[in-house]
Image: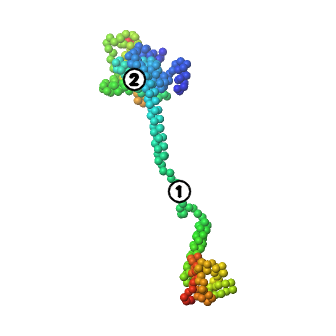
Amino acid sequence: MNNDEQLKALYQQRKSQTKPPHSTRQLLLAKARAEQVKPSYNLWNWTLGVSLCAALLVLFQYVGLFHQQWQPTYEVIQVHRWHEESQTEELAAVLAEKARIEHADNYARYLQGQQIVTAHHKRLARLVNTEDGWGLQTCDQELVLLTAQLVEQLLNSRRLEQQLKKGDEVEIAYDAAGRILTIKPASKLSC
Amino acid sequence: MTLTIAIKSLLHIELSNEELMSRYVLSGEAALLARLYDNCARDLYHFLLTLSEPDLAADIAQKAWLKVMEKRHLYHSNGQFKAWLFTLARNLLMDEYRRTQRYPVLEESDICDEGSPSCSDGDILPAFSHALDNLPFYQREAFVLYQEGFGVQDIAQITGENQQTIKSRLRYAKQQLRQRLGEHREQ
């Protein structure tokens, strides 16, 4: 037997002569058994915990539902901004041309309207006879032909003086659309 | 791990301390703690008895086991249960020494009482016991832990020292014990 083995054997021999106090074992086991009863408490706590969680869940759902009910409904409005839209140069040119034409049309219509309004105020004429019926010769040497149907309509609606005859000077009133409203004798023709 | 323990338990195969502790951590079953106590109580008590007086050793041993119960959730299943237990006990003992300002004897006492059985008769065990008790505290501690089956690394972890220090302590402890036993034989 070498020295290490001898020391080991002596150590084991020494240890075998010692005995841990029995009271420690008893105390320890009593305490462990007392703690072992706790599973019922744990079960109770566990049940309590689950109940609390469930209650919280229900509460959250209720609050969520309530919140959802009170939320106003919005309509979605899509906002487009011209400068934000990506467009090609060709498209821009087309749109510019379209706008220009539209503007020109509007301006032409405006000028035409102006002419009509101006004519409405200014137009004086001399009543003449033509092959097709009556005619009105204006100061700027324009001849407005009145069809028999129109003369009849004007007479029926008393917009044309019945005593008018060839060579009479008349004043023609137009509406804004350029239609003849009335033809009545004028005091003098001042072309 | 848990499945292995359960199967072993069903087949009545002896469980290791680590397996018993792992089961105890999960279940808190008193019977498991009793088995752990039966497996390790003597080793622990002897370790403490070698480093202190009987009353203090019993007190510290009891506190250590109570701590095993209280702190069982801190036990790592991959660790050695006995090392954890001894670490708890050693810390408690050192705390007690600090609290009472009774520091362990660091130097060996080479006194052999007149009429002491270890000095007078030819029985080697009392001589060994006497020699062990008279080793410097830290050498004694290292030697006992080594005899309890811990490696140098384990002892270093339990005592919070580096491995070289532990090796030195072990070497000196063995050397002195051999010397004392040699002297005893010569007498």
- Residue B127 picture location, percent across and down: 38, 14
Chain of the residue under the numbered disc 2 shown in the image = B
Q: Residue furthest top?
A: B121
In terms of depth relative to the viewer, which is nearer, B154 or A158?
Answer: A158
Residue shown at the point (45%, 25%) measured from the top left: A39
Look at the numbered disc 2 and give the secondary structure of its residue. helix
Q: Residue at x 59, y 74 (%)?
A: A105
The C terminus of chain A lies in quadrant? bottom right
Q: Residue at x 47, y 47 (%)?
A: A70
The answer for which chain carries disc 1 is: A
In terms of depth relative to the viewer, which is nearer, B93 or A29? A29
Instruction: Tell me whether the residue at label 1 lies in contact with that at label 2, contact meaning CB atoms closer than 8 angstroms.
Output: no
Mark 2 residue crowding within 10 angstroms, few (<14) / some (14–19) / many (20+): some
| Amino acid type for the residue under numbered disc 1 | Ile
Query: Would you place residue B63 above or below residue A170 in this image?
Result: above
Q: State the residue in front, A70 or B84.
A: A70
User: Measuring 60% from the left and 70% from the top, which residue is drawn there?
Assistant: A98
Residue type beneath disc 2: Leu
- Callout 1: helix, strand or loop? loop
Compared to A154, does B35 lie above or below? above
User: Looking at the picture, do discs 1 and 2 lie on one chain?
Assistant: no
Residue A47: percent from left, percent from top: 46, 30
Which residue position is annotated with label 2? B66
Which of the numbered marks, if any, corresponds to residue A77?
Answer: 1
Q: Is residue B82 visible?
A: no
Q: Residue furthest right?
A: A131
Placement of A97 over or under A117, stated as above or below? above
Q: Nearer the viewer, residue A78 or B187?
A: A78
